[in-house]
Image (spheres, grey):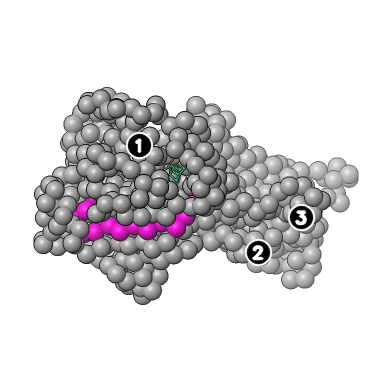
Amino acid sequence: MSTTSTVRSAASVAAGEAAAPIIELRNVSKRFSKKLDFAGKIAQKLGAPVKDETVHAVDGVDLVVRKGEVVGLVGESGCGKSTLGRMVAGIMPASGGEIFWHGRPLNSLSGAEARHAKLQTQMIFQDPYASLNPRMRVADIVGEAPLVHGLTRRAEWDAYVDNQMRRAGLDPAFKRRYPHQFSGGQRQRIGIARALAVQPEFIVCDEAVAALDVSIQAQILNLFMELRQELNLTYLFISHDLGVVEHLSDRVVIMYLGRVVEEAPAEEIFARANHPYTQALLAEVPRIEARKKSFAGIKGEIPSPLAPPPGCHFHPRCPHAFDRCRVERPALKEIAPGHKSACHLNDKVA
Amino acid sequence: MSASTASPAATTPARAPKVETPWRRFVSEFCESKLALAGLIVFAIIVFIAIFAPWLSPQNPYDLAQLDIMDGRLEPGARDGADTMTYWLGTDDQGRDMLSGIMYGLRISLLVGAGSAIIACAVGASLGLLAAYAGGRTDTVIMRLVDLQLSFPTILAALMILAFLGKGIFNVVIALVIVEWAYYARTVRGTALVERRREYIEAAQCLALPTRRVIFRHLLPNCLPPLIVVATMQIARAIALEATLSFLGLGVPITEPSLGLLISNGYEYMLSGKYWISFYPGIALLITIVSINLVGDQMRDVLNPRLKK
Ligand SMILES: Nc1ncnc2c1ncn2[C@@H]1O[C@H](COP(=O)(O)OP(=O)(O)OP(=O)(O)O)[C@@H](O)[C@H]1O
Ligand code: SF4
Ligand SMILES: [Mg+2]
């Protein structure tokens, strides 16, 4: 644990590259299918144009998160970020591909090991209102799992819970209260205390600040970074906003309609974005140094994930799209050390 | 709450020191309706009478030695043959004091009603939770059973079961459980399907809590409000159903009459002017069911989130 540096700098990023992967996704997919109900089946028999609907929420994603890293995962709403996060956190099984935890396939782990792996990866949820059980007191929300898993004993439980709350910036005096008696920011702190209470090494933050006021957002983000120093945590930081991720991440992964389109160290993404989608996202981030804007924002709507466009999913909105983009899916290829992009333009140049 | 949003790290909820628990809120909102409160008080009195019937009643109506057939069908307010007690509500054809009979009858009726409702609730709620949580085939099998159960007319199903099992308090309870569990299962499943999609359930799964714990400690408490409402209404229904079965002669044994059986006993004398043998047990049944329904109605209003302002 102590071998990895927790100081954020270019050097530590380089050191991070060498660290062992905590989690590795290989060609992971998640499909949600909605089977036709009885009425639908009859309608289909009668010739109505209805079919079983399948959403490819996550489509063949490769991803590695190494010990001590902060990886930012960015994409528009509905592109499958939460679904990916849930699979990483072990809440949801993948429908295709394999997930490795410390180099071992997640679904090959035995009962006790699988539980340990699950506990080591915790998730902070998008909605601070829905993610806390409204019928439990804060002390039980935070302290239930550690007690169940034997991380603390009855006699020390109170002190243990107090510690977790204090670490998340909550006054332990409020531990007898119910979630509805707290503000959004405080609730998110409760969620953080709950996750930290099982002593995880890796935390998936699913838009953990998106629902909060801007002033509170900064507080919670600072808390995440303090905790990272203190507890040597690894983060997968999910956001729809490149701006939020920029200041936190060592590495940034960009998703579009279930696929990874670009992946690079944070500095690299902001300095030399390769994929047209990333460039469009960057153009949307308000920045102090005015960028040379090649195009304003992203034109067009996000296509329905039920019927994604063939070839490169981005082609209907891409200003550089050409014939090949409409038929062939671009592969994610390394275009510079540590920088991968999935765009046919890169082949053209070469 | 909004006052505290701007305060820094160690934050302070802006509430009075008294902790507002969901239970306290429920009690204060329930008491807003005076009618429901009256219903609750009446019901509490009825329960009290039923529990302490042996100490409160002037006579033990089940003890044949205490009954005097010569006192049969005396009208309300009459004195008994030995001039030791007054039959305030008259007597039935066995010479049984109606007041005592009603007190003991309440006992049987409430026992059967509440007992069957509690068992049906436990069975139905567990199956409903399982259906919602497991989904897929488990869900389909359980819900088809529910549909099947609900498609039978309740009274017909209960009659068939009792015809098969025979008379007796225990058998009546079994019959009522079989015809009622489906209501609980359907209600709980509906709520649980919504609740299980919420992130706190995912959080519990992420914390690797055992499935049973997630279902009963996290999911169930959040499905309780509609369940309580249905349970209240179903207790009233079960009492009425038991009365109907006993009235039809398929319910409790004649030696330990419930309210329904008392009504049935006096039914043949209704037209000959001896109304009290059926009338007073009927009134007792009516008051019991109405008071439970008043409580249930208010609970539904208080616990239904859609009606919340
Ligand atoms: N349980 C589910 N059943 C069916 N479809 C689902 C389910 N969960 C997600 N989806 C679908 O998968 C796609 C990706 O959803 P996901 O929640 O992962 O997106 P997201 O990137 O997190 O979006 P947001 O920014 O809105 O949170 C969406 O089209 C969504 O409708
Ligand atoms: S592959 Fe084609 S459509 Fe897709 S981003 Fe590259 S240029 Fe645009
Ligand atoms: Mg999401």
Residue position marked by numbered label 3 in the rendering: B151
Q: What residue type is labelled 2?
A: Val
Q: Which mark is nearer the camera, 3 or 2?
A: 2
**Whole-Å distance between the Cαs marked 2 and 1?**
52 Å
- Label disc, if present, on residue A125 of the rendered structure: none
Q: What residue type is labelled 1?
A: Gln
The tally of labels here is 3
Q: Which mark is nearer the camera, 3 or 1?
A: 1
**Whole-Å distance between the Cαs marked 3 and 1?**
61 Å
For the point 65% across and 43% down, the residue is B289
x, y percentage for residue A263?
A: 32, 49
Whether tag 3 and tag 2 are in contact, CB under 8 A, the answer is no
- Label disc, if present, on residue A279 of the rendered structure: 1
**Is residue A223 shown left or right of residue B257?**
left
- What element does badge 3 sit on? helix
Quadrant of res B245: bottom right
Q: What residue type is labelled 3?
A: Ser
* Chain containing the residue with disc 2: B
For the stretch drawn in magenta, what is the main secondary structure? strand
Q: Which mark is nearer the camera, 2 or 1?
A: 1
- What element does badge 2 sit on? helix
x, y percentage for residue A108?
A: 38, 74
* Chain containing the residue with disc 1: A
The foreground one among B179 and A8 is: A8
For the point 45% across and 58% down, the residue is A60
* Chain containing the residue with disc 3: B
The foreground one among B231 and A274 is: A274
Residue position marked by numbered label 2 in the rendering: B141
Q: Does the residue labelled 2 lie within 8 Å of ligand 1?
A: no
Q: From which residue to which does the magenta span run?
A: A57-71
The foreground one among B282 and A108 is: A108
